[in-house]
Amino acid sequence: MDAMHSLRGGELHVDEVPLSAIAERFGTPTYVYSRAMLESRFRAFGAAFASAAQPPLVCYAVKANPNLAILNLFARLGSGFDIVSGGELARVIAAGGDPGRTVFSGVGKSEAEMRMALEAGILCFNIESIPELERLARVARGCGRVAPVSIRVNPDVDPRTHPYISTGLEANKFGVSHRDVLALYRAARALDSVRITGIDCHIGSQITEIGPYADALARVLDMVDGLRAEGIELEHIDLGGGLGIRYDDETPPSIDEYAKALLSAYGTRPQRLVFEPGRWLVGGAGLLLTRVEYLKPGATRNFAIVDAAMNDLMRPSLYEAWHPVHEVCPRQSTAHRYDVVGPVCESGDWLARDRELAIEPGDLLAIGAAGAYGMSMSSNYNTRPRAAEVVIDGSAMHEVRAREDIADLYAHESLLP
Ligand SMILES: *Cc1c(COP(=O)(O)O)cnc(C)c1O
């Protein structure tokens, strides 16, 4: 289940489709996703929790990859959604997702976003501070509704991942300190326009060990017991997302190990479990297809300049993330070491460093494990149109987002009078 592509007849394929056929039809750079792999990951997540007293609600974290086709695919499989903006809520609705299975996370919800989510009837707001709770209560009263709330606790555990994607430490901006949780629940209970439904935490992303999850769960369960002693009963416990995938030589726990560890600590509690996986569902199901424009030998490094860049895939520049790079039609010739870089005018514009590749200008490369936080973090820096997105379904190719037109990039701009 780890690789979405295979080498057949000397060429990489996604399912039945050779990557060169995708490049020919849609150009490059293009994000390519496998429908089969998206579906099998979603099903595997649910199957791992089959022994739970009640099936958990899987709320796909939209920000990992918000393409409507992907949201719709998961909605058809019964997914809920974890959103972090009004824009993401609009996407969920446009894709046929159920707002009643949608949780709203994030530290900075605006009044307009709160109103929009109340009117859509979302499952709950994941509340991250007292001022946010007060604002939500006021907005809900204003539109004559009762807002379902869960408090996002910060369990203060170290997820041992990159500092930029670590969220469950006291020093991070996320969640409510475990010291203040009880006070916040008491405040929520006193508000007429708010209804307490759950508790949640999300400790970080690309987590490759069970330990931090077990620690976070233990702390959350302590809080649930403390709340119960106060007469505050919860309907759900949301353990967030963050389970890591393999990019290079990481050895994240399997989904079965993850589920087993959590379920054994969870026992037979009555609350429904909720999860918010993003990367784990989509990361391995996407690649970025790009073409080599130039080979530029240098005194200390050789550069392979490709037509994808940091604006298309920001993770290497942002986190020094490692992505596999595959030749689409491997050559027999001698390989050389290259830094794979884009055309953007920044020295930080690189996609991979020091890779053995046997390539010529014009060759195609596939940058693997790019289904999560690839397209969703892309930008138009250097006035580069965003890449096309294509879903492969068996032997069929479906363009699910057309490459942007250059004129669209400045369509909302105007000249001074
Ligand atoms: C980003 C995010 C997720 C998903 O994280 P992954 O590492 O992609 O699984 C889940 N919940 C919240 C609150 C998030 O911010």
Image: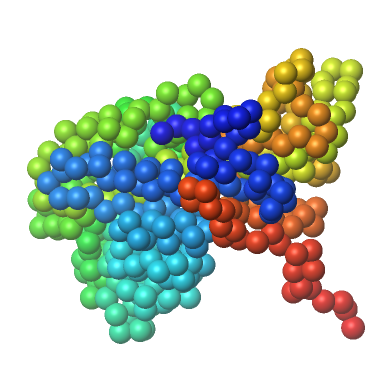
The image quadrant of residue 293 is top right
**Residue at 53% of width from left, 35% of height from top?**
5
Q: Is residue 194 left or right of residue 384?
A: left
Q: Is residue 333 visible?
A: yes
Q: Say which of 81 and 271 sits in front.
A: 81
Q: Position of residue 266 (x, y in %)?
A: 17, 39
Query: For the image shown, how many numbered marks are present on the structure?
Result: 0
Please tell me whether residue 345 is drawn above or below residue 83 in the rendered image: above
Q: Say which of 163 and 230 sits in front.
A: 163
Q: Is residue 379 visible?
A: no
Please tell me whether residue 105 is drawn above or below residue 89 in the rendered image: above
Q: Position of residue 338 (x, y in %)?
A: 76, 24
Q: Say which of 195 and 23 sits in front.
A: 23
Q: Quarter of the image for the C terminus: give it.
A: bottom right
Q: Position of residue 129 (x, y in %)?
A: 38, 58
Q: Quarter of the image for the N terminus: give it.
A: top left
Q: Say which of 329 and 169 sits in front.
A: 329
Please tell me whether residue 241 is drawn above or below residue 191 in the rendered image: above
**Residue at 38% of width from left, 43% of height from top?**
41
